[in-house]
Image: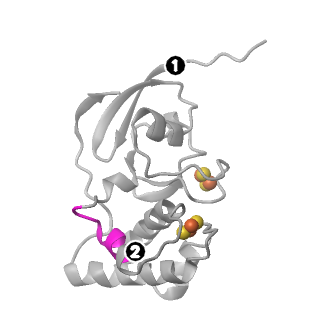
Amino acid sequence: MSKQTTTQALTLEVNGTRHSLAVPPETPLLSVLRNDLGLNGPKYGCGLGQCGACTVLVDGVAARACVIPAGGAAGRAITTLEGLGNRERPHPVQQAFIDSQAAQCGYCLNGMIMTATALLARCPHPTEADVRRALSGNLCRCGAHLEIVEAVLRAADLLAETGSEAAPAAAVSEPAAG
Ligand code: FES
Ligand code: FES
C-alpha cells in the first residue's frame, strides 16, 4: 500500500513574519525555507544532520533544518541568515566574518554564522576553546577553520564594543500568504 501524504495548513514564524503554508508537516524545514519561502541562506549539505550547512535558530537555539520536520517548528521562532542582517546592514557576526575574510567557497558560512550567533547569545565572552567546541559539528571542506574561529572572537569583541545583542530581535508581523 502506498504511503499517504497529508497536506495541511501550517503556520511558521520565520524572521519575525508568520507564513501560512500548505505543505505536509513532515516536509523538512530546510525544504520549506528554501523552496516555499525563497530563503536560500540555509544550505543543503548532507541532508543528514551531520554537516551544519543548513543551520537555523529555533527559539534562539542552533538547529539543523534538514532533519527537523516543518510541523515540528510550528509555533517556534525561526531565524535564518536573512533574519540577521543584509548587505547594507550586516549583523555584527556577519561583519566580523567579512572583516576576518573568513571564507573560501563560503558554503559552510551559513552554518558557521548561525551557530556562532547562538553561541554568542548564550556566552558573550567565549574563549577560543568555547568557539572551537561550539563549531566542532560544523564542517568546512575548505579548511578555513582558523579564520572562522578568529571571526567569532572578533564578533564577540564587536558586540561588546557596540553593546549589541547577538540574538536578533524578531518582531512578529501579520500573517503572509505562503
Ligand atoms: S544539510 Fe543539514 S546538517 Fe548537513
Ligand atoms: S569556506 Fe568552503 S566549506 Fe567552508
Quarter of the rendering containing residue 174 = top left
**What residue is disc 1 on?**
7
Is disc 2's CB within 8 Å of ligand 2? no
Name the element at disc 2. helix
Q: x%, y% of residue 52?
A: 58, 59
**What residue is disc 2 on?**
97
Name the element at disc 1. loop
Q: Residues within 10 Å of mark 2 (few under 14, many from 20)?
A: many
Is disc 1's CB within 8 Å of ligand 1? no
Looking at the rendered structure, the number of numbered marks drawn on it comes to 2
Question: What amino acid is found at the position of numbered circle 2 in the picture?
Answer: Phe
Identify which residue is drawn at 36% across, 74% down.
98
Q: x%, y% of residue 111?
A: 51, 61
Identify which residue is drawn at 49% across, 67% down.
112
Q: Nearer the viewer, mark 1 or mark 2?
A: 2
Question: What amino acid is found at the position of numbered circle 1 in the picture?
Answer: Thr
Name the quadrant of the N terminus: top right
Reading the chain from its start, which is encountered first: label 1 or label 2?
1
Q: What residue occupies the far right of the structure in this picture?
A: 1
Task: Give the CA distance from mark 1 to mark 2.
Answer: 40 Å
Q: Is residue 171 above or below residue 33?
A: below
Magenta stretch, residue numbers: 88-97
Name the quadrant of the C terminus: top left
| Circles 1 and 2 in contact, beta carbons < 8 Å | no
Q: Is residue 43 above or below residue 151?
A: above
Q: Is residue 22 above or below residue 12?
A: above
Whether residue 89 appears in magenta in the rendering, the answer is yes
Q: Is residue 10 left or right of residue 47?
A: left
